Amino acid sequence: MLRQRLLERVLEDGTAAGRVRAADPDAVLTSIIESLRRILNSGWGDASIDGHYGLPDLRGLVRNMPQSADGMKEAIKEAVERFEPRLKRVRVRRIDDPDSHRVHFEIVAELNDEDDAETRPLKFNTRLERTGRLEISA
């Protein structure tokens, strides 16, 4: 199981400390959150690795809320499934929060870990900020 992104593995110095960080569940979770931030705050065409890395332009979706919530939910699900291979069985649902007047989504997935016989769901909360960025937390 790859517990680190490619860039994290390249930057590691190959020491025992690096290998311990790769196996540390908190370090893995932190790495996944950072990866989700990069994916979900990138727009199509922003990254040279793939023209569909990230999300489509959210401005149009945000302007048409709440009607466009399903499209946004699907775009998040597809991006996570495609670009975060450490997660499997990805599900996304919209969370209504009338107090904050912001768009929230919950991402639930399992760690794609063949070494772990018992899979546990991982839960991430996303919040669309007024700046247009998605904030992700566990």
Image (cartoon, rainbow, N blue to C red):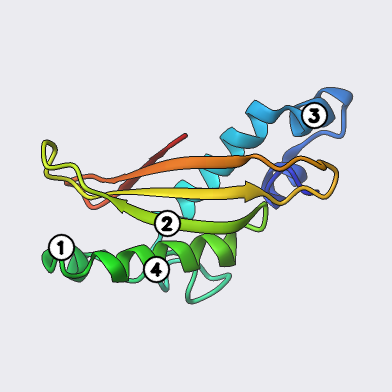
Q: Is residue 19 above or below residue 91?
A: above
Label 2 neighbour load within 10 Å: few <14, some 14-19, many 20+: many
Q: Earlier in the sequence, mark 3 or mark 4?
A: 3
Residue of label 1: 66
Where disc 4 sits, the SS reads helix
Q: Earlier in the sequence, mark 4 or mark 2?
A: 4
Marks 4 and 1: which is nearer the front?
1
Residue 136 position, x and y percent, is: 40, 41
Question: Label 4 to label 1, Cα distance in Å?
Answer: 15 Å
Amino acid found under the numbered disc labelled 1:
Pro
Relative to residue 23, is residue 52 drawn left or right?
left
Q: Is residue 92 above or below residue 29?
A: below
Label 4 neighbour load within 10 Å: few <14, some 14-19, many 20+: some
Residue of label 4: 75
Q: Depth check: give the residue in front, 56 or 26.
A: 26
Marks 2 and 3: which is nearer the front?
2
Residue 113 position, x and y percent, is: 77, 47
Residue of label 3: 18
